[in-house]
Amino acid sequence: MNGRPRKRSLTLRGHRTSVSLEDEFWSAFRDIAAAQRRPLNDLAAEIDESRGTECGLASAIRLHVLRWYRQQ
């Protein structure tokens, strides 16, 4: 797998946005959404709403993935 981030599109509350994540983080993010039986865009919107202004969306997703796997 390539370690460089790739841009992917998401829809957050009806608005399209893009986020750059490494393949491994994107795959883990999708696995988490599937494990929670919820749409990826809904999970992304929740993360976006709770991240505050000091953290970008991509970083917030990476931190969410890290916290998820630490709790497992």
Image (cartoon, grey):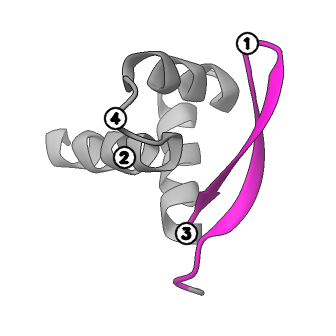
User: In the rendered structure, which segment of residues is drawn in magenta?
Assistant: 3-22
Query: Gap between marks 1 and 2, in whole Å?
Result: 21 Å
Q: Secondary structure at mark 2?
A: helix
Sequence order check: which comes first, mark 2 or mark 3?
A: 3
| Residue denoted by label 4 | 54
| Residue denoted by label 1 | 13
| Residue denoted by label 3 | 22
Query: Gap between marks 3 and 4, in whole Å?
Result: 21 Å
Specify whether residue 14 is painted magenta: yes
Q: Position of residue 19 (x, y in %)?
A: 65, 50
Sequence order check: which comes first, mark 4 or mark 2?
A: 4
Position of the N terminus, as image quadrant, is bottom right
Specify whether residue 68 is painted magenta: no
Q: Secondary structure at mark 3?
A: loop
Can the viewer see residue 58? yes
Marks 4 and 1: which is nearer the front?
4
Q: Residues within 10 Å of mark 3 (few under 14, many from 20)?
A: some
Marks 3 and 4: which is nearer the front?
4
